[in-house]
Image (cartoon, rainbow, N blue to C red):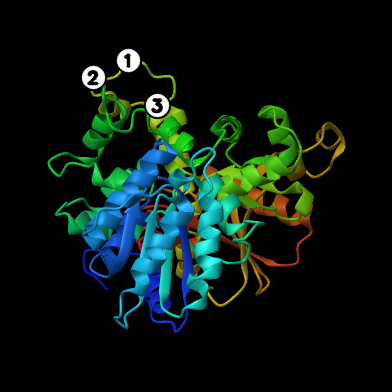
Amino acid sequence: MKEHIIGRTREIERLQRYMASDHSEFIAIYGRRRIGKTFLVRELFESEFAFRITAKENATTREQLMNFAEVMQRMTGTACHVSDWSQAFRMLANYIEQDITTCPKIIFFDELPWFDTRGTKFVSALEHFWNDWASYRHDIKLIVCGSATTWMLNKVLNARGGLHNRVTHSMLLEPFTLRETELYFRSRGFNYDRNEILECYMAMGGVAHYLSLFEIDKSVAQNIDMLCFTRGGELVTEFNRMLMSLFRKAEKHIAVITALQTRGMGLTREDIIEQANQVNNGNLTTLLRELEECDFIRSYVPFGKAKKDKLYQLIDPFILFHFRFMHRRSNLGGNYWLKMQSKQDYKSWCGYAFEVVCLNHIEQLVHALGIDGSINTPCSWSYRPSPLTISNSDDEDLKHRAQIDLLIDRSDQTINICEMKFSHNEYVITADNNEIMARRLRIFSRVTKTHKSLQPVYITPHGLANNAYARRMPRTITANDLFT
């Protein structure tokens, strides 16, 4: 493994295994914009490509074909002219056939969707290239990348034409984890501690390109100010650019995201249809799947509910940060973010943003709880008493609302009830906190009628301050656990 590739251990192992296989491979790598797809492939195979080309954004068919011809000329040393994509792929096949080496022939098409310009026959030519030539050999390793998720899913991964079931491997490149973010900053000489990295992740998430924009002589807060709240900052208009590059007809995706950001626990499909003015059909199903594939949202069934009650929850830190602080903000400059850190709105955001970080690190939470081997279902639960219950019930607990933002339903007859609390220091469980948690457990037990054991867990960056209530907690998870 190359030392300068941060994280991506599983992806690297998979790619190296595919390169070593004794048959041709068609590998599709996809994921959100600026997540590091191109960097991963180039760093792994830069000196091993038999052919590599990157499409031009917003170029015509003629310009794309000229681009192909120029690349082919550099490879062969001979000037060439390409009139259409069928000819281009025949030329590529002829060029590869002249290579008598025994090593795998790695062919890399980067930003594949951009090649598919209006009126072109690029996809059919690619289909013929793979089906009629490459797949019959044993040494072709065709790697395609693309950020335009709609196109990649519809034209390659879920294609119904000639590429149907032809992709031998698909790979979704996900954002960095907290640990990978820490390794990235260390590799670039930053001295941020884990508190600062957590703050960075709460606003930026684990998008490699966003992290690459940080300047080493600035604090996390100063970098966020520079990138998001300064005129000309590189991330000021990132929200719209990102969505428009990922999805064709992105307006619908933006409408759904805008609706989802209004409710932390998520919305049902029916809620989305109503609030985002969507039509209940297969297009909405595709849209939600695309957002989930890009790690913008997650879907889950609340505890005790049926599949029809599935919720869709926005879990992308940067998008949530955009709506909370950047959306509709016109007066840029003046150290806005630095000044915000003394405001109540900042403290409120920290609480929710930390919860989102936890949701993005369920694997680490499960490991910290020591329950890797069991089947674990992370979800939420809420209870709202009816007016009749409030008026007539003899059970005072059931007259109160209750909400659990994260519970982990385990196959060993235990449910972890997770209380996520952000604090810059050790979190102090007060008598009120303790009573709220105890009442929540009682309500959950009575309403759900579960026979499983309920185990409360506090998740807080610096652990709990030592007092009588903290000593009763069977388990506490800290930020260090999330960095595992």
438, 371: nearer the viewer: 371
SS label for mark 3? helix
In this rendering, position of residue 201 left or right of residue 380: left
Q: Name the element at disc 2.
A: loop
Q: Amino acid at mark 2?
A: Gly
In the foreground, 354 or 224: 224
Which sits earlier in the primary sequence, circle 3 or circle 2? 3
Tell me if residue 421 can be seen: no
Spatial CA span between label 1 and label 2: 9 Å
User: Residue 209: x, y in percent?
Assistant: 31, 46
Residue 340 appears anywhere in the view? yes
**Residue 273 rendering spot, x and y as whole percentages:** 72, 33
Do residues under tags 1 and 2 come within 8 Å of each other at their CB atoms?
A: yes
Which residue appears at 45% of the width and 80% of the height? 138
- Per the image, the residue denoted by label 2 is 334
Circle 3 residue: 326
Q: Nearer the viewer, residue 17 or 68?
A: 68
Q: Residue at x 83, y 31 (%)?
A: 387
Verify CB contact (< 8 Å) between mark 3 and mark 1. Answer: no
In front: mark 3 or mark 2? 3
